[in-house]
Image (cartoon, helix red, strand yellow):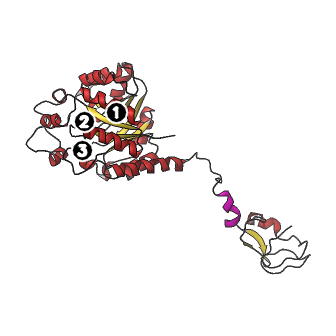
Amino acid sequence: MKTLIIAEAGVNHNGSLTLAKELIDKAKEAGADIIKFQTFNPSLLASKFAEKAAYQNKTNNQNENQLDMLKTLSLEYEDFTELKIYCRKKGIQFLSTPFDLESIDFLNQLEMPFWKLPSGEVTNYPYLVKIAQTHKDIVMSTGMCTLDEIGEALAVLRENGAGKISLLHCNTEYPTPMEDVNLKAMETLRKAFDAPIGYSDHTKGIEVPIAAVGMGATIIEKHFTLDRNMEGPDHKASLEPSELKAMVRAIRNIEKAIGTGDKKPTPSEIKNIAIARKSIVASHPIKKGEAFTEQNITTKRPGTGISPMKWRQVLGQKATRDFTGDELIEV
């Protein structure tokens, strides 16, 4: 099954439509299936009293509040319409996460394939109801959540007409420490909610999302940027284009490597069976009529003769002809 790979551009365009289009170009070149942005009205997303996260203070002006920061990172609604058209032109699927009710209304007009819900909205009842009432499929991140909170959100979504719901295990620290990743939680989510499971990654590097695919993730979301040295809250925890391309390539290889689960010789290795296995051979010359014993037979390559697993059946039988040393035994 092909993993759905979402390249999370988020706000890494820094409020520039030109940079947003460059991100689309790079996501397409990397082989991602979808590029995702974030759509919000800053004044509807955060109050003037909302403080920034610690990681945001490290990369942005420490004297501004969250609202001030968001104003520098937002695009106009008409910009997202243009980005949707640009994505269609480039051959990559457009997606954007809404962060307020007004943005849900706007994005619903753009006919996206599904809604991507961020971790921070899992406990936002009015938001969940409005999303669900569009009757579209949903992919929901679960960072910071308990199982009870996820269960409550799923109940609200289903009661209000949501389509198919997939869950992404996630940790919302940027970057996420390796010891906090907890990939095994994906299986916990799968068992608890009987839903398709994926992983939204905020670690540095590409190894964790690759491992997640090996553990059964059907969706991978990963932040990327044009340059990690750019100013902005998410750049430091994002991949650069070459790394995104390497991640996509590795995930596609892992998909092939997972296979069907059947244990049998594969087409590529059948030709090596005769070379790598052994047969029963004469350990030294044997005369016709002489019995095969532990002293005059042994096992050696190639594996084109009698299998050593027939050893006990061969012992005691009489040679039907002379055999030279190393010659394959026949009975």
C-alpha gap between disc 2 and disc 3: 17 Å
Q: Is residue 167 above or below residue 204?
A: above
Does the image show residue 76?
Answer: yes
Residue 324 location (% of width, % of height): 83, 79
Q: Is residue 269 magenta?
A: yes
State how far apart marks 2 and 1 are (Cα): 11 Å
As drawn, 210 above or below 131: below
Q: Is residue 184 visible?
A: no
Disc 1 crowd rating (10 Å Cα; few below 14, some 14-19, many 20+) is some
Name the disc covering residue 86, or none.
Answer: 1
> x%, y% of residue 1?
52, 40
**Residue at 89% in and 79% down:** 287
Amino acid type at mark 1:
Tyr
The residue positioned 25% from the left and 26% from the top of the image is 78
Looking at numbered disc 3 in the image, what kind of residue is underneath it?
Asp
**On the image, numbered disc 2 is attached to which residue?**
17
Q: Earlier in the sequence, mark 2 or mark 1?
A: 2
As drawn, is 72 to the left or to the right of 89? left
Is 155 or 204 nearer to us in this picture? 204
Q: Which residues are magenta?
A: 268-276
Residue on which the image places disc 3: 234
Q: Nearer the viewer, residue 58 or 15?
A: 15
**Dot 1 or dot 3, earlier in sequence:** 1
Would residue 178 appear left or right of 73 to someone viewing this image? Answer: right
The crowd level at tag 3 (other Cα within 10 Å; few <14, some 14-19, many 20+) is many
Amino acid type indicated by mark 2: Leu
Q: Main secondary structure of the magenta part?
A: helix
Q: CA distance from mark 1 to mark 3?
A: 23 Å
Q: Secondary structure at mark 2?
A: helix
CB under 8 Å between discs 1 and 3: no
Asked which secondary structure carries label 1, the reply is: helix
For marks 2 and 3, the one nearer the N-term is 2
